Amino acid sequence: LAVGLSGSVYIWSACTNQVKKLCDVPENDAITSVNWSQRGNHLAVGTHSGLTNIWDTQTCKLVRTLTGHQSRVSSIAWNGNIVTTGSRDHNIHLRDLREPNQTFCTLEGHKQEDAALS
């Protein structure tokens, strides 16, 4: 289980019944969304500033930072190596984490904040 509280992300393990802090964001930022990869070893963390950080939860190391949104990342969805993020900036970005380029597809023009992706 992953929980974003203000500027920190905490992970609870059902196997060990322990809680550990995964990360903090800068003081002027906040966690706005979290979503596990299907295999459960990576966690995508969206922020108020528009960043999406991909974390390896086994090593507690930041793997990659995805940019491109101008406002908070309100929703994240995984499909294998594809990470899709929706933002208050009315854009949806699709990214293949195997590729060095950030975004391979952007859907623009949504009238409201994208709250759910699946």
Image (cartoon, rainbow, N blue to C red):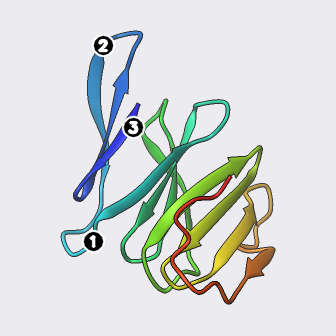
**Decide: marks 3, 2 in contact (CB < 8 A)?**
no
Mark 1 crowdedness (10 Å alpha carbons): few <14, some 14-19, many ≥20: some
Q: State the image coordinates of residue 53 (x, y, percent, origin top left).
A: 49, 59
- Asked if the residue at tag 1 contacts the one at tag 2, i.e. Cβ–Cβ closer than 8 Å, the answer is no
Give, as a three-letter code, the residue at label 2.
Asn
Instruction: Indicate left or right for 117 with 17 as reference.
Output: right
Question: CA gap, disc 2 to disc 1?
Answer: 29 Å
Q: Eyeballing the image, is 1 above or below 73? A: above
- According to the picture, the residue beneath numbered tag 2 turns out to be 17
* SS category of the residue bearing label 1: loop
Residue 60's quadrant in the figure? top left
Quick check: 11 left or right of 90?
left
- Disc 3 marks which residue? 2
Q: Residues within 10 Å of mark 3 (few under 14, many from 20)?
A: some
* Amino acid type, callout 3: Ala
Residue at image coords 73%, 65%: 95
Instruction: Tell me the residue that label 1 is attached to.
Output: 29
Residue furthest out toward the top: 15
What residue is at 63 percent from the left and 53 percent from the top? Answer: 77
Amino acid of disc 1: Asp
Element class at badge 3: strand
Residue 47 coordinates in the image, percent (x, y)? 40, 67
Q: Compare marks 3 and 2 and give the one earlier in the sequence.
A: 3
Up-down relation of residue 48 to residue 62 (above or below) = below
Crowding at dot 2, Cα within 10 Å, few <14 / some 14-19 / many 20+, comes out as few
Q: What is the CA distance from the residue labelled 3 to the residue labelled 2? A: 13 Å
Residue 42, horizontal then vertical, whole percent:
57, 40
Which of pointers 2 and 1 lies earlier in the amino acid sequence? Answer: 2
Mark pair 1, 3: CA separation: 18 Å
Compared with 4, 11 (above or below) is above
Location of residue 102 (image quadrant): bottom right
